[in-house]
Amino acid sequence: MALNVSSKGLGGSIPPCIGNLSSIASLDLSSNGFIGKIPTELRRLGQISYLNLSINSLEGRIPDKYSAYGTTPSKVRYHQA
């Protein structure tokens, strides 16, 4: 399953309920107006293979869970605009 909401003019904080998408394989939230901390709930995305948080105003780290359990997404993008 994939969710691509890139360049949709979304803003505010990424809601913690994003972690409820536990079976998602691809998540693209890039090129929006997201601000604040990267939610720790992202660690619940156990099936993720692509994660793009770039071109937002986010701070913090991608949860360490991915490297600790060998489920590192093959493509992770994270930088500010």
Image (spheres, rainbow, N blue to C red):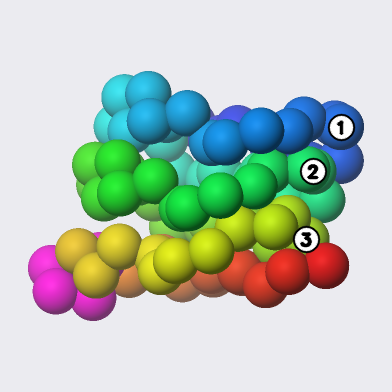
The residue that label 3 is drawn on is: 55
Q: Residue at x 31, y 24 (%)?
A: 20
Snapshot quadrant of residue 78: bottom right
Q: Residue at x 52, y 57 (%)?
A: 50
**Up-down relation of residue 25 to residue 77 (above or below):** above
Within 10 Å of disc 2 (Cα), the crowding (few <14, some 14-19, many 20+) is many
Q: Amino acid at mark 3?
A: Ile
Relative to the observer, which residue lies in front, 80 or 5?
80
Contact between marks 2 and 1 (CB within 8 A): the answer is: yes
- How far apart marks 1 and 3 lie (CA) works out to 12 Å
Q: Earlier in the sequence, mark 1 or mark 3?
A: 1
Q: Residue at x 46, y 53 (%)?
A: 38
Q: Amino acid at mark 2?
A: Asn
Q: Earlier in the sequence, mark 3 or mark 2?
A: 2
For the record, the magenta segment spans 66-71
Check the picture and name the quadrant holding the C terminus.
bottom right
- How far apart marks 3 and 2 lie (CA) works out to 7 Å
x, y percent for residue 16? 38, 30
Q: Amino acid at mark 1?
A: Gly
The residue that label 1 is drawn on is: 9
Where residue 81 is drawn, which disc sits there? none
Relative to the observer, which residue lies in front, 29 or 59?
59
The residue that label 2 is drawn on is: 32
Contact between marks 3 and 2 (CB within 8 A): the answer is: yes
Q: Answer with left or right where residue 57 lies relative to residue 61.
A: right
